Amino acid sequence: MQKVTVRDVASVIETLAPLAYQESYDNAGLIIGDANMSVTGILVTLDVVSATIDEAIASGANLIVAHHPVIFSGLKRITGRNYVEQVVIKAIQSNIAIYAAHTNLDSVPFGVNSRIADIIGLTKQQVLEPVENQLVKLAVFVPTEYADKVRTAMFAAGAGGIGNYDSCSFNLEGTGTFRAGEGANPFVGEVGEVHREQEVRVEVIVPKPNISAVVSTLKHVHPYEEVAYDLYPLLNAYGKIGLGIVGDLPKPMSESDFLQMIKERFGAKMVRTSPHLGKEIARVALCGGSGASLLGRAIASGAQIFVSADCKYHQFFDADNKIVIADIGHYESEQFTMDIFCEYLSKKIPNFAVLKTKHITNPINYF
């Protein structure tokens, strides 16, 4: 079997959930370990605790892939005074690497919130809070007869998507001029002579994580020795990326039937709710983990209920008889993240041991 390194696994995960999409407060990525270390096995978990390290050692795995970063804020000392420091010490002593994909996995298609929406059975899914400042417009000038080739290559590299459409571009024909200097090897024209060439200005939208691949591809397929292109940052919201999901139920349900359904599907011991409104549930907004900050978005979306976790006492007042808040618990809302990791890694790195933890790391119990 071909050698697989920690860096290889990280690269695979970041294809699904680029680090550029994590929130500013987050700490996703390689938390502990050597990126060049050969991986003997992968253990997938929601949280990393001491028992997780023991399980990895027992199973022969030396890489733990988690949703929650075990180191979330800075450590000034590592003395074992709390569970985070204990995990760090044990992982380093045991040569266990730890990688986390957190809010970046929350924000992408087929990520955490999409999985929650699928489990509920929502149709017509849309991102509840799309990100901004994550798109650029790339404009490049191409000889007319090469425009199709360049466009197609950029599309394949990750450019040209707008909403549910792909292969999107704008094209404007014109005339380019240039003069090749000494040492140049022009594709057309002669050294020392001004040349006029019929060209097409091709414009495409590129998500920021794809810029490097698209520009590299562009330079590879473009016929000119020096490629003229521009990158313009855009303020547009990126509808495919962001926190939360809103969607429709296949058939409306009563509040009590819906709450019973999510309680069963997420294995929640209890669901904390704001006052019921006596309305049928047809449209559902959700956000895995601590999503109370998206309540205003949920109300604006026209949803009758907002499914999330970690809502504080006073935040339930903010429902204001406009929506029902259903707090199903942090672990309960994100537990299926482990399945996302297992399925994706097993598909991208076949014939490699990817194990799902047997430990329930939920620190909250109900009496």
Image (tube, rainbow, N blue to C red):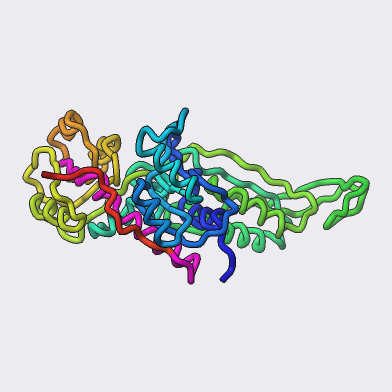
Report if residue 351 lies within the magenta region. yes
Residue at left offset 72%, top offset 62%: 145
Vertical position of residue 102 compared to residue 318: above or below: below
The quarter in which the C terminus is drawn is top left
**Which of the 4 image quadrants contains residue 297?**
top left
The quarter in which the N terminus is drawn is bottom right
Vertical position of residue 60 compared to residue 303: above or below: below
Q: Residue 104, how many percent across, how many down? A: 43, 46
Q: Residue 285, how many percent across, how many down? A: 25, 46
Of the pair 117 and 125, the residue shown nearer to us: 117
Residue at left offset 42%, top offset 63%: 354
Vertical position of residue 301 compared to residue 253: above or below: above
Label count reads 0
Residue at left offset 48%, top offset 67%: 352
| Res. 90 in view | yes
Farthest-out residue, left: 278
Q: Residue 126, how many percent across, how many down? A: 33, 51
Report if residue 82 lies within the magenta region. no
Q: Residue 195, how many percent across, how many down? A: 85, 50
Lateral position of residue 92 relative to residue 153, left or right: left
Of the pair 357 and 225, the residue shown nearer to us: 357
Residue at left offset 40%, top offset 35%: 80
Of the pair 99 and 322, the residue shown nearer to us: 99
| Res. 302 in view | no
Which stretch did the figure color magenta?
324-353
